Every structure is written in structure tokens, then in C-alpha cells.
Amino acid sequence: MKRYLFNLKSMFLGTFVLLSSCLNDDLPDVGDLVDLTGPTPSFNFNEITSSQFTCDEVLIFADYEVFFEAGTNLSVNGTQYEWEITEIINPNTGQEQEVPVAVDYINSERTRLIASIEALKPDVIAIEEDIEELELKLPCETDQVKIDAILAEISALEIALEVAKDALTDDTQQSISDLESQISNLPAGTINDQNVIVAFPGPGTYKVALTVTDNNGWSNAIDESLTIVEAVPTIPVPEIAEPSFEDNSLPDGTGDGRDSWRVPSNSAWSPLGGGTTVIQINTDTNPVDPPNLPDGRQAAKFPAGGARVAYQEIEVTPGAEYVLTYHSAFEVTQFAELKVSILKPSTSSYTESLLEENIIASRTDNNIDRVDNIWRQHALSFEAGENESVIIYVTNSGDESRLDFFEILVKQ
């Protein structure tokens, strides 16, 4: 029995040694099998196109760049990568043609190095971007009061910029300088880089092909169509004057919180057919900071009875979509409603504001289940359509209502 067990054990060890020799790359030509599968290529890409326009939408520059990242299946290592890019003429017509195209290959390390610099001086970068935005906006401004306000803001930012730069330590400045030198000395990207940034000559449809070759000399290729969309100006965010009804918040530093919200004509826009329509101001005098208001220490007050209204015409971009947000609060002794409407600019009276043909969008909130003096935020979406401006119009009925902190953003 012992001899039998010993023979079985010897057979097992012999088999193990034989298998080991087949897997050992130090023993060439002994049981090696050639891998005939070849690599399985794949790639991801991320568009990093950047552009800049003047305030009147004239293109300053557009860099159509895409970051490509190549890979292969885990079981096979690609030892060589090769990119090929052609332009597709007349795509999706059945008469497509591929033609050679000149593109620039940029070292992908540039992205990491730039991000590292930005991380070292975020305050400086933010202020520089604010100054640049104001300087681009300035040439198209015609209101001298706003021009003066923009120039004053630029001057204040330039002072803040110097303070931010002075706050950078010597070590930080040296690190930034080192990173900038690395960027300057980066070798150009090539078609054989695994990860590379490709600068395309302009918008269009392109075929991106990737060939991967493994260490056995086997190759496989994949390709994918990529459409580069023409850069377009960013839709500007409309300006709402005195959005939180604060004193001295106009561009020239004046205003009583209501000046931008007055109707063109009391008699035309009064829900009651006459009398004053000017909103009142509710001021939080509580010394606690922050105050019990969504923004600042003042809010618009609409007394019971519905005689007061808020009116402001703002510029919009035709075809754009927007989201208008604001906050409301109510007295709760009797039923109350507060209505915010977006009207066409041709609307000329309260009566016309009730016509569906003049209402672009509206929202009505009430005080049911509301708590006295507790604020709640609301959102109202609308499309500009063909309009270059719209009217924000607010009315109320029943118990006293309050309104504060208008904001607007472009809907993506």
C-alpha cells in the first residue's frame, strides 16, 4: 500500500514539473504556444474645444481639440499604437468620400501640467477670467453709466489681482515656473502616442482609426466617425436690475430697490385701473446675520388688495431657453396668491397681460400650507422664441405677499 501511494505521489510531482516547464519562458521551444488572437483595440475621447467671441458675437479664436486615450484587451499588451485621421466629405449622403486631412498632434501631458498650474493659483485664474469677460463686454456697451460701472469693476479686480499674485509664496511661484518650463519643453505629440490631443482644422466629420500591434507582431484596427461641431457664442445670461430689491444696487451705486421695477404707466398697468402701482419694500432690521431673507436685507412687499405690481423688461437671446428663479413669502390670515409672468415685449397694459397670446410663461403660488414669513424658492422656465426682450411682471391678490432674490440662467 505504501509503495502504491509513493508511486502516485511521484506521478503527481512529475506531471507538475512537466506543466511548469511548459509555462516557463526560460525554456524556449518547450511547449510554447503562439498567441494568434492579436490585440483588441479600443479608445475613448473627450472634446476639449475652446473658443472666444466678442460681445457682438465675432469669433476671436476657436481651437477644435479632442483628447484621445487608447487601450487594448487586458490579456494582450499593445506595444505600438498608430492613429490615422481622415475627413469624410458629404457624410450621410451615400456619396461619402474620405480625404487626407492635416491635423496637429499635441502631447497629452499638456492637459495635466496646465491643470497643475491652475490648482496652484486658483484665485489668480478666477480674477483674470473675470477681467477678461468684462473687457470683452465693454466695447458693446452703449450706456455710459454701465460703461463707468464696468471700468470701475475692472479697476477693482486689477487691484485684487495684484493682491492675489502677491499672496503666492516663493515656493508656489517656483513650482508654477517649473511647470511652465515643462510645458514649453514638451515634445510634440505623434501618431504613435497611446494618449494624444488632436487639433482638428475646423468643424466637420472625421474618421478616426486606431491600429494596435502587440509584442508578437499581430495587429488589429478599429475606427469611429467623429463630428466636430462649429463653435458658437455662449448665450449671455440676462441682467436683472435690483434682483433682490436692495438699496444702492444699480450699476452706478444708486437706487432704492424699486427703481428698476416701476411700470411705464400707472394707469395702463394698474390691476385696479388707477392709483400708484409701485411696490413697497420690506426691510429686515433684525441685527442677526444672516438676516431672515433669501438675499440681503430688503424684499419686495405686495400689500393685500393687489394694487402694487412689479415690472421689468430684460434682454434675452432669440431661440434661447431660460430658467427664472425667485423666492416668495406670505401672510397667512387669509387666502393669497402671487403671480409671476413672462410677457412679450409688445404687451402694453394690465388688460393685455391677461391675454394668452401675450403670456410666454407664468406661475401662480398661494399661501395654502405655508408658514408666515418662511421663504420658499420657485422656478419658471420659458423660451425666448423670436423675442429680443421679455417683461417680468408680478401681481398679487388676497393677503400680503413678499418677493425676493430673482436669478436667471440659460437652460442647457
Image (tube, rainbow, N blue to C red):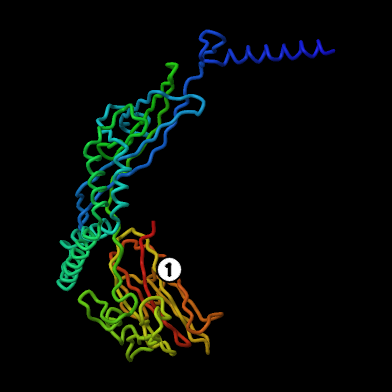
Tell me which corner region of the image, top left, top right, bottom left or bottom right, holds residue 188: top left
Give me the residue at 30% from left, 86% from top.
Answer: 266
Residue under pointer 1 = 380
- As drawn, is 122 to the left or to the right of 75? left
Residue ranking furthest to the front: 2
Q: Nearer the viewer, residue 321 or 246?
A: 246
Q: Position of residue 365 (x, y in %)?
A: 48, 77
Task: Count neighbours of disc 1 (C-alpha within 10 A) and say few if under 14, some if 14 to 19, many if 20 or more.
Answer: some
State the quadrant of the C terminus.
Answer: bottom left
Residue ranking furthest to the right: 1
Q: Nearer the viewer, residue 175 or 245?
A: 175
Residue 293 vs 130, above or below: the answer is below
Q: Nearer the viewer, residue 376 or 393?
A: 376
State the quadrant of the N terminus.
Answer: top right
Residue 374 vs 128, above or below: the answer is below
Tell me which corner region of the image, top left, top right, bottom left or bottom right, holds residue 411: bottom left
Q: Position of residue 61 (x, y in %)?
A: 21, 47
Q: Label 1 is placed on what type of residue? A: Leu
- As drawn, is 221 to the left or to the right of 30? left
Tell me which corner region of the image, top left, top right, bottom left or bottom right, holds residue 287: bottom left
Give me the residue at 24% from left, 30% from top.
Answer: 102
Give me the residue at 34% from left, 61% from top.
Answer: 385
Element at label 1: strand
Q: Nearer the viewer, residue 264 or 220?
A: 220
Q: Position of residue 330 (x, y in %)?
A: 47, 83
